[in-house]
Amino acid sequence: MVSNSNIPRAVVEHMVRDQVYAKMGLNLPESAQAPNGLAVNVSARHCHLTPQAVEALFGPRYELTPMKGLFQTGAYAANETVTLVGPRSRVISNLRILGPCRDFNQIELAYTDAIALGFDVPLRLSGEIAGTPGCMLMGPKGFFEMAEGVIRAAPHVHMHPADAAYYGVQHKDVMKMKVHGDCPVTFDNIVVRIDESFNLEVHIDTDEGNACGLKPDTYCELIKQINESNKKKENR
């Protein structure tokens, strides 16, 4: 039984799966045995804001207050929320802000959210907001107009360099993710993002999570995706 509270949750989940598979007389697939375990989480609609946007919405010198920590080190869901006004004058209230503040403003919506609000949102990686739609945000102390920054976040995996070395991938490579369970699905084009500060975690949105029936105990595996140029090299 695991009692060390400092062990990352993904590692604990991996250890539990390993024991369950062993009891069943099965072995975990090789792709499940990454050095730091694998977490797959649904990223619900949210926003990232600059300090200037926070002050416009909540008042001068206002700072976000953490509500709960997230899987990535230093990231948190803030107590503060805003109201998002879409092109059809429809709104989403209580849109959660994720902290800490960034140097750009960004709204991440699922496709069904975007349709309901009237947005035509592109699929983008976080931070790649050039040419994306803008919106209006309302807070308790004012309004903030974003000229751009509303996206549907591309499915991606955060990796420490040790995990990237294990899987044999580089920054911005793409992988497949096989989701087992009652609604098995294989996602293509999971974009790899690598940083020393990252914990091994896949982010999909609520539409994608619902489509595959993702649950906390659903077994998922990452698979290196071979592109056409690599296939040609291997066939020589």
Image (cartoon, rainbow, N blue to C red):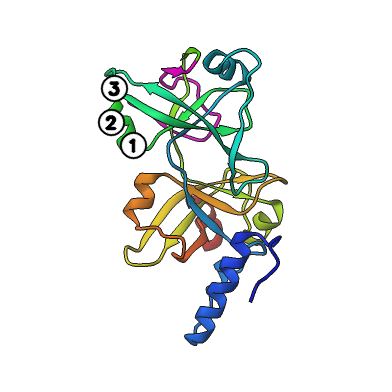
What residue is shown with label 2?
115
11 in the magenta segment: no
Q: Are marks 2 and 1 in contact (CB under 8 Å)?
A: yes
Query: Please, what secondary structure does the residue beneath circle 1 have?
Result: helix
Q: Residue at x 42, y 44 (%)?
A: 205
Q: Does 57 sit left or right of 187 as displayed?
A: right
Q: Are marks 2 and 3 in contact (CB under 8 Å)?
A: no
- Compare marks 2 and 3 and give the one earlier in the sequence: 3
Query: Please, what secondary structure does the residue beneath circle 2 have?
Result: helix
**Where does the image place residue 10, in percent across and percent down from the top left?**
59, 61
Above or below for 236 versus 22: above
Relative depth, front residue between 196 and 206: 206
Query: Please, what secondary structure does the residue beneath circle 3 have?
Result: loop
Real-space CA distance between mark 3 and mark 1, rounded to the nearest whole angstrom: 15 Å
Residue 181 placement: quadrant: bottom left
Real-space CA distance between mark 2 and mark 1, rounded to the nearest whole angstrom: 6 Å
Q: Residue at x 47, y 56 (%)?
A: 176
Q: How would you rate the neighbour count of disc 1 (Cα within 10 Å): few for under 14, some for 14-19, many for 20 or more?
A: many
Give the residue type at disc 2. Answer: Ile
* Magenta extent: 120-140
Above or below for 182 versus 145: below
Residue 90, label in figure: 3
128 in the magenta segment: yes
Q: How would you rate the neighbour count of disc 3 (Cα within 10 Å): few for under 14, some for 14-19, many for 20 or more?
A: few
- Compare marks 3 and 1 and give the one earlier in the sequence: 3
**Where does the image place residue 144, in percent across and percent down from the top left?**
48, 13
Real-space CA distance between mark 2 and mark 3, rounded to the nearest whole angstrom: 11 Å
Q: Main secondary structure of the magenta part?
A: loop
